[in-house]
Image (cartoon, helix red, strand yellow):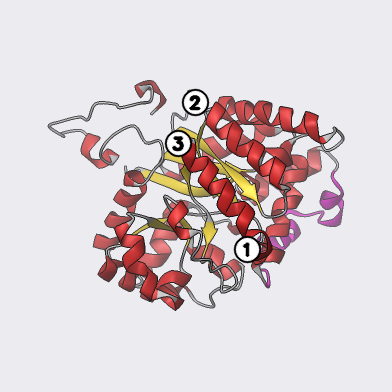
Amino acid sequence: MALYAELHRHLGGSVVPRIFWRFLRRHDHPLAEHYPTYESFEAFYTRPRSSLTEYLELHSLVEEVQTLEKLPYFVSKLVRGAYVFESVGYLELRHSPYLRTDARLPERDRLAQMREVVETIGRAGRVPDYPLLMRQILCLHSRLPYAVNRAMVDLAAALPEWVCGVDLAGPDVLYRERLGEFLDLLRYARSLGIRTTGHLFETADGCYPEILPLLDRVGHGIQIPLRHPELLPEVAARGQCLEVCPTTYLQTGTLSDLADLRLVFERCREAGVDITINTDNAGLHNVRLPWEYENLLTQDIIDFDQLRACQDAAFRHAFAWPYPVPPRAMLPGSSSRPTPTGANPGEV
């Protein structure tokens, strides 16, 4: 079977609708009363939104119920589904740990509790029956104070067993007024040896070329080939890839048709820029990773050579994949199995 690497998936958007609806019903959540049938809830949960900002409000809805006590439930279900239904061998799961802490606590205690959140997610992701390798990316958030975001960078540095990088996330229209802060935080992360990615050039409002040099990968980045192709040589020279999440752009109204991505793939291939395919929020979309590939392929946006190139690029650009080549070389009949370079082989 094919093995996939998923580099851009959010914990807040990862819960598939039926599992989330059952959870809400079991806990007598008001949403379960408002949407008494699964079909009505699914229609609400997965419908397209008018903007990225409106779309991100759904994350707040899920974060509210992903408390410290409930995180093992959500993470274990996510890992099981990714391994069984998506053939995911490596997963980078991103989230803001501060948003899973107890909101009733003072900020100092919430900052301390972030460590427990990360460790709880990490342990819950180790499911013996579904042995994918999972690492976390901590999201610096455009709506969180500087001190909280800096504490997340420090936490990433302190927990390399669980965390492989940091991300810049949240509504991108808010980046501009705090650009200096975010540049400082990304420089700080890199000074500590932390890998970096960021939601950038996803929408027309999210184009900040000042941030690009501080990233190892570009979260989304589709507006670079679409609106700013002059930046592609710089992206290629830095060895950055674009973390493309096709269904997201339809859900947020960023693109009106998947066919709009054809130009993204064409210009990136010409410039030598790698693309990885990701779900972003598989639960909010109800679209799993193999379907993202299949949709691009059947709509003639990519061909099979590009499909394989994207599959391989995902492992090559992974922040914590322990092998030097994608798992295709480890299939039965391969003459040379790579030697692990970091992680416990039993985790893979």
Count of numbered tags: 3
Residue 31 magenta: yes
Horizontal side of residue 179 vs 28, given as left or right? left
Q: What residue does disc 3 label?
A: 193
Q: Do the numbered discs 1 and 3 sit on residues whose CB atoms are within 8 Å?
A: no
Residue 164 location, x and y as percent? Answer: 48, 36
Residue 332 location, x and y as percent? Answer: 20, 33
Q: Nearer the viewer, mark 2 or mark 3?
A: 3
- Distance from disc 2 to disc 3, alpha carbons, whole Å, reads 14 Å
- Distance from disc 2 to disc 1, alpha carbons, whole Å, reads 30 Å
Residue at image coords 72%, 54%: 143
Q: Earlier in the sequence, mark 1 or mark 3?
A: 1
Q: Earlier in the sequence, mark 2 or mark 1?
A: 2
Q: What residue does disc 2 label?
A: 161
Q: Nearer the viewer, residue 252 or 333?
A: 252
Part of the protein shown in magenta: 29-50
Residue 174 magenta: no
Residue 172: mark in rendering: 1
Q: Do the numbered discs 2 and 3 sit on residues whose CB atoms are within 8 Å?
A: no
| Residue 169 appears in the picture as rendered | no
Q: What is the crowding at mark 1: few (fewer than 14 residues within 10 Å), some, or many (at least 20)? A: many
